[in-house]
Amino acid sequence: MGRPPRTWHAGCFLLLMRHPTLPSRSLALACAAAAVLTAAACRPEPVLLVDDGRIDLGFDVDGAPMGVTRDPLNGRLQVLVENQGIVEIDDTGAAVRTLPVGVRGLLDLPYRDIASLGDDRFLLIADNEGYLWDAVTEQHRVHFCVEPGFVACFDENGELIDDNHNGVCDWDEAQPQPGPEPLIVQRNDALGLVGNEVVAAPRFYEEGSRVEATLRSYDASTGVATGAVDLSAVTVELAGLTPQGGILVGVGGDSLVRFGSDGVVGDTFRLDGVSNAVGVIGDGDGVLVLDQPSLSLLRFTLDGR
């Protein structure tokens, strides 16, 4: 008997993923209500437009911005800054407060993206691992892993049976064992939170050649892997993910990708005014894209929905 499918709740859509160790089932987008589905079928395809909205980071940036999230409780934007920490900003881009690395348990790791769970609890991705940091309890631990070859261990009923690797992952014996100095390197990580599902899109390289590009999902509460979809055909190296308007979008470089009904990739748009997008977060009927070189958040809308 297989493990029941999990869902990513994003507006009226359900994004279904199955764990790769279980019977395969392709990713699909489906409207939750028949009435909404009928209406959606008559809508023109969305067109990406840049809005006049722009937020310049109005604080002293000591390192490179790496990601952006939004506190689900107070609605404030929080920017992940390399070697600095997490900076919460107001609508003008001014810093309201800073959660610096080296304080309250936040380790100084090469984080690539961030997602806020609220109450000063964050998911971060770095070093082939997904971390959970709780600033209140000052606990920082591995929460899920994204390195190629690691899988969660389930029995025939879909129950987690292995407690290795912080209760999250076990090494797949069919994969090559890592050496003392792993040749595989991870970069361009994207992390997003869709309901109670964490979505990550790490890419792995070996001696300059890409060896894996996968969109993966995990239970946000337990860190257990719930599904994976191959992204080898996606040319954009995703550095940020977010749900928006019932779909999932990702950004990287000067581009935005809308994930289509097949769950892999839909349209790709060029982001005017953006040269290196490193983060994205939903914002009303649009998205805010974090552009690393300009130290700013640019707002884009999806017109025609």
Image (cartoon, helix red, strand yellow):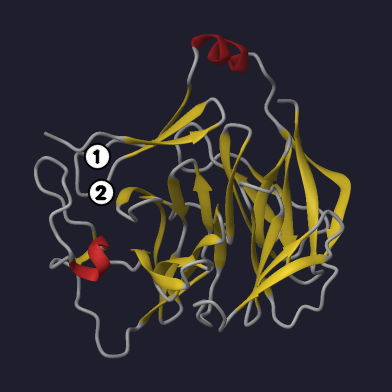
Q: Foreground residue, 217 or 93?
A: 93
Point out residue 195 in the picture as x, y percentages from the top left corner: 49, 40
Viewer can see residue 271? yes
87 left or right of 214 in image: right
Residue furthest toward the bottom? 180
Query: Residue 167 location in percent, x, y?
Result: 23, 63
Direction from residue 126 to residue 148 in the image, left or right: left
Q: Residues within 10 Å of mark 1 (few under 14, many from 20)?
A: few
Under mark 1, the amino acid is Ser
Q: Secondary structure at mark 1?
A: loop
Residue identifier under label 2: 20
Res. 217 mark:
none
Residue at 38% across, 51% down: 221
Quarter of the figure that contains the C terminus: top right
> Residue at position x 67%, y 18% from top?
43
Residue 223 occupies quadrant: bottom left
Answer yes or no: do the residues labelled 2 and 1 have beta carbons within 8 Å?
A: yes
State whether residue 210 appears in this view: no
Q: Is residue 99 left or right of residue 8?
A: right
Identify the residue at image location x=69%, y=77%: 64
Q: Name which quarter of the figure residue 247 lies in.
A: top right
Q: Position of residue 143 (x, y in %)?
A: 36, 63
Give amino acid for label 2: Pro
x and y percentages locating residue 137 in the rendered image: 46, 68
Asked whether 255 or 294 is in front, the reply is: 294
SS of the residue under disc 2:
loop
Q: Which mark is residue 24?
A: 1
Q: Residue 77, located in which quarter of the rendered image?
A: bottom right
